[in-house]
Image (cartoon, rainbow, N blue to C red):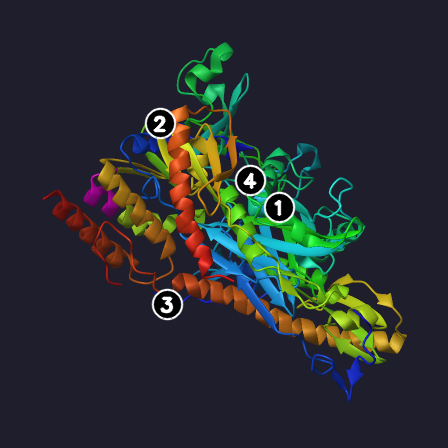
Amino acid sequence: MSKPEKLIVDGKRLDGRGPNDLRPIKFQAGVLKRADGSCYLEFGGNKVMAAVYGPREVHPRHLQQASNAIVRYRYNMASFSVEERKRPGPDRRSIEISKVSREALESVVLKELYPRSAIDVFVEILQADAGTRVAGINAASVALADAGIPMRCLVSACAVGKADDMLVLDLNKDEDNYGQADLPIAINQFGEVTLCQMDGHLTTDEFSTALEMAVEGCKKLHELQKQALIEKYAREVAPAAPEISTGGETSE
Amino acid sequence: MSEDVIAEIKRDYIYSLANQGDRADGRKFDEFRPITVETGVINKAEGSARVKIGDSQVVVGIKIQPGEPFPDTPDSGVIITNLELVPLASPTFESGPPREDAIELARVVDRGVRESGAIDLSKLCIESGQKVWMVFIDVHVLDHDGNLIDASSLGAIAALKSARLPNARFGLGEDAKLPLNDVPIGVTAVNIGGAIMLDPSLDEESVAPCKLTVITNKEGAISGMQKSGVGTLTPDQINQIVRTAKDKANVLREKLEGTQ
Amino acid sequence: MAEKELVVPGDILGEDPKLASHGTYVQDGKVYAASFGLVDRRSNIKVIPLSGRYIPARGDLVIGKVVDVTHSNWIADINSPYEGLLHVSEYPERVDQNNMSKYLHVGELIIAKVADVDPSMKVELTLREEHLRILKEGRVIEISHVKIPRVIGRNGSMIKMLMKDLDCSIFVGQNGRIWVKGSDRNVDIAIRTIFKIEREAHTSGLTDKIKDYLKNELEVMRNQNE
């Protein structure tokens, strides 16, 4: 893939978006049978599956904590998720992402309610398209709520960057690869920043503006996360599919 | 983990049902759970499929990239199959390198594809002795509700059917379909108290002493088999399973007709 | 039944911290939802979660599955992040500790009472009460424990209806496990009905719907027998 000549043309990004536009987003909560909570998310070209098991027994035992649950987070990319096949297994990048993502969510989980247990969060990136870590955190937040894990609030995340000297929200692949800065941020509804990383070059003013853009982006994501949970409930309340019984059909 | 301990009354129930010719979910012995196959689900991969058998769910991605051939087969492409039992798919799966069950699953899926000659490796040569196409079959299990092997092998062949050689990206001309010669299909059976049942559910798999997977090709010849588990089977039972698997494979093959 | 309001973690529920109850938390003098669930404002403010694992409380009656045996305890999986410990002294007869498995072995199911839960979540079970026992027959199913109150019904009305109409013995564990015993066909109907209650727990008029469903199922069965 060669570098495009310009990333911003006439104030519009290569994918047609304005600087404050998020890519198309679709959340679906409660999609897996075995997991306690789950969420499938499509965020631009990202396809992410998040699942939560917990609270559950801690294995190995020695990792238990006497007065609260431990929170574990595993970010993993499927081999086929990227252009050049990725060897399976954690690499240094996934381990770092797992750590900061866990920290982003751990700050809101009410861990003290479940001593000596583990809350395990798993995020599988099935298809990657820039911004996988923030997509993971968004999906994981919904999966945690779906699992009934008590939290102070949901956590929403998005990345702000700089392309051709313009600050842009929610980087696409080209902006991520060839842009001048990448700032993934997670913020919750109380305005607490739970994830903050930066690569590249930003002046302090630019940073300040970027942070504001992230706050707005996260607000929009929060609405979508909430919607996904409400929709899942609506599916449960909606009249059931026709009964399959020993021959009779019940009318609802 | 206590997941591995089956309640005795549950085991007794499944066995007594089998004795009467019934299964816990009401299926006939040779009936599969509802199957859905979708291809083209991961556009970045050269081929992909998502398969559900009941609530078991797998996503298979095919990545095709140029690479070096093996020294003893300088003109042949290479197939590499891997399977991940990622922890989100089941409370019993742990993070870490593949354990024996994941490795066994991957190798059985591989056997079916390789031994049936489904992929003609001689057609995957780019430059003799230097460059050939490497076909990576990566199975990502997302939800484990029994019979992952059939879901994975069905997913693999469905993904391969939809795969294309990415010639354009490597300056080798236009993209082309991955040439496939055959459509191997795996069918798995368990023996519960003498009763042979296809497509075991999670519970049936847990109480059965062993299972047998039979992979057959378009002509109905066997291209792969695997008995898994400590229990035993008689030659008659094995022959019966082979016959049933061959018939069932034709039905499953039809399910793939609709896909790319 | 008034429409219950659906909330997600972080939704603000009220301004009086004194009313904060289960499923909520207090921050800066305000009451917020901690769980994804339905708000109940009848007496205080609580959120009834739609999902979540069973957490044992003293007095709960549960169905446990024995998963390990030590010299002085049986260890039971009670469908919770916390396992239940049944000490030899809580077994209804004298036990020869050299042969623990003779009295209760791995894979057996028991109806036990949660005698105590200490702050570190050590759960002690007992079998030393009237209706507690080892389950030798029947079938056990598992549903989400949050739906158990619906299966029981107000004053036990739902479960009593099932037992009477299907002539079955049914025991409902607080931990989401339910035991049913009766004729094969009726047990099938009972189990299908319980899963139906679980699926439709949030719909209104459920008791009547289930009553109709049972009537229908029994009629279908009678017709098949003719």
Which mark's residue is nearer the viewer, 1 or 3? Answer: 1
Find the distance from the CA under tag 1 to the CA under tag 4: 21 Å
Find the distance from the CA under tag 2 to the CA under tag 1: 33 Å
Cβ–Cβ under 8 Å for marks 2 and 4: no
Q: Of helix, strand and loop, which one carries label 3? A: loop
Residue A104 x/y as whole percent: 72, 58
- Magenta-colored segment: predominant secondary structure: helix
Look at label 2 and name its amino acid: Gly
Left or right for A92, reference C78: right
Q: Which residues are drawn in magenta?
A: C160-168
Closer to the camera, C115 or A125? A125
Q: Earlier in the sequence, mark 2 or mark 1?
A: 1
Residue identifier under label 3 = C2
Closer to the camera, B66 or B186? B66
Which mark's residue is nearer the viewer, 1 or 4? Answer: 1
Residue C60 appears in the picture as rendered: no
Residue A239 x/y as whole percent: 34, 64
Cβ–Cβ under 8 Å for marks 1 and 3: no
Residue identifier under label 2 = B194
Closer to the camera, B183 or B159? B183
Disc assigned to residue C81:
4
Discs 1, 4: same chain? no
